Image (cartoon, helix red, strand yellow):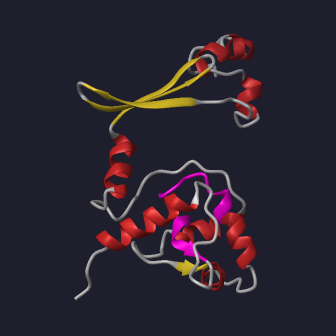
Amino acid sequence: MYDVGYGSSSRVYERADTRLGMTPRQYRQGVRDVAITHVTVESPIGLMMIGATDRGLCSAEFNSWVTALTQYIAGRQPHLDLPLDIRATAFQMRVWNYLQSIPYGSVQSYGEVAAGIGAPKSARAVARACASNTVALVIPCHRVVRGSGELGGYRWGLARKRTFIDQERAHRPQVH
């Protein structure tokens, strides 16, 4: 603290809410109850993603992940390798990491995923982990279906799930 020029600890916190965009207490609590609204717009220099809280801008980025996601949806980029900042239990992380290993254009049942993570009796917990996923496509919970082959559930609606599965199947790499 002193090495970066502060004369006392009170000076560190003096304007923290304006410099951090939040109070030290909000930061310490993991930014709970801070809503971020966002929009993606076309600009003269490419897609721009803008995020803001009620206090002001918190993000302004060009292209970045938006391009990767739109390329993925169009079937031109079958592998997404994007940085994630997600909160999860250890079980959810096991499920989500496994889901990222399911090949593009393929599906597995909740039971197959449960067996794949070494917890064969936890198909219902796998379904709950899928329902908790807040990062659509990047963690491909749309690739998990019921053992009967029916779609099952999907946080963003079954029509989207069907579209994603069909899109991937139409653009999956052909194995010779």
Q: Is residue 75 above or below residue 30?
A: below
Q: Is residue 137 magenta?
A: yes
Look at the image and give the residue range highlighted in magenta: 130-145
The residue closer to the viewer here, 152 or 126, is 152
Answer left or right for 46 relative to 136: left
Image position, residue 82 (x, y; %)? 43, 53
The residue closer to the viewer here, 26 or 144, is 144
Q: Is residue 75 magenta?
A: no
Q: Is residue 4 above or below residue 132?
A: above
Q: Quadrant of the N terminus?
A: top right
Image position, residue 54 (x, y; %)? 63, 19
Q: Is residue 17 above or below residue 69?
A: above
Q: Give the residue at x 40% y 74%.
A: 105
Image position, residue 162 (x, y; %)? 48, 66
The image quadrant of residue 45 is top left
Answer left or right for 108 relative to 166: right
Image position, residue 60 (x, y; %)? 42, 27
Q: Give the residue at x 67% y 22%.
A: 22
Q: Give the residue at x 54% y 80%.
A: 108
Number of marks drawn = 0
Answer left or right for 69 relative to 131: left
Answer left or right for 70 relative to 91: left
Say if residue 139 shows up in the picture. no
The image quadrant of residue 6 is top right
The image quadrant of residue 41 is top left
